[in-house]
Image (tube, helix red, strand yellow):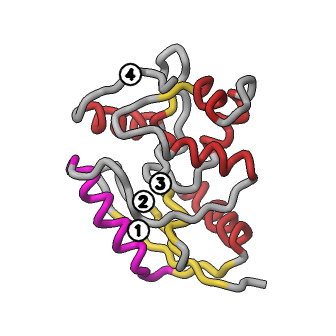
Amino acid sequence: MPTSLCRTTTIDTPLGPLLAGARDEGICLIAFPRPERTARELEALRRRFRCDVEDGDHPHLGHLRAELDAYFAQRLTTFTVPVVTAGTPFQERVWAELRRIGYGEICSYEALARAVGAPTAQRAVGHANGSNPVPIVIPCHRVINKSGKLGGYGGELWRKQTLLRLERARGWLPFDRA
């Protein structure tokens, strides 16, 4: 039985609309709405947090909207909006490490696997990266293949490429964080 509430809204961005969700603890969902996935994402949110999901506003959503506006205007390099996730312990380690990848930096899946203490688990790291419920704020777009190819992105590769170009405009840092 649901014990809490998640408010969702759509936020317009240069990448198209984002579906965002917030609970009192923080932002819990950012998704690029696609009809074939949105219902599943909202159902996963309900299960993950044992919550009801309703359209509406929340102070964290206003904070997110303002920070996204500043990010896309290249005035923000670090998000401060509170985030709440509910993944497996491994996913949580990967998502925490993603937050350490700085603006304008990129990292390989291999380096990310080493950073979370699982040097042979690049595929598992890739899966956790792809399961990130709060992209952009938790910057999964900054992870690319060791070869330099983009790899995948749940929001479509053109968005990942756009985000990397946006950040590169402020200065591109070395490929790997060692």
State which region is magenta: 55-74
Cα–Cα span, label 2 and label 1 = 5 Å
Residue 58 coordinates in the image, percent (x, y): 43, 80
Question: At 52% across and 38% down in the image, what residue appears?
Answer: 153
Mark 3 closeness class: few <14, some 14–19, many ≥20 residues within 10 Å: many
Foreground label between 2 and 4:
4
Q: Residue at x 68, y 39 (%)?
A: 127
> Would you say the residues marked 2 and 4 are in contact, meaning their CB atoms lie under 8 Å apart?
no
Question: Magenta stretch containing residue 71, yes or no?
Answer: yes
Mark 3 to mark 4: distance in Å? 29 Å
Discs 2, 3 touching: Cβ within 8 Å:
yes
* Separation (CA) of disc 1 from disc 3: 10 Å
Q: In this image, 89 relative to 170: left or right?
A: right
Please say if the residues under marks 2 and 1 sit with CB atoms less than 8 Å apart: yes
Q: Which residue is mark 4?
A: 174
Residue tagged 3: 32
Q: Which mark, by number, is residue 23?
A: none
> What amino acid does circle 3 point to?
Phe
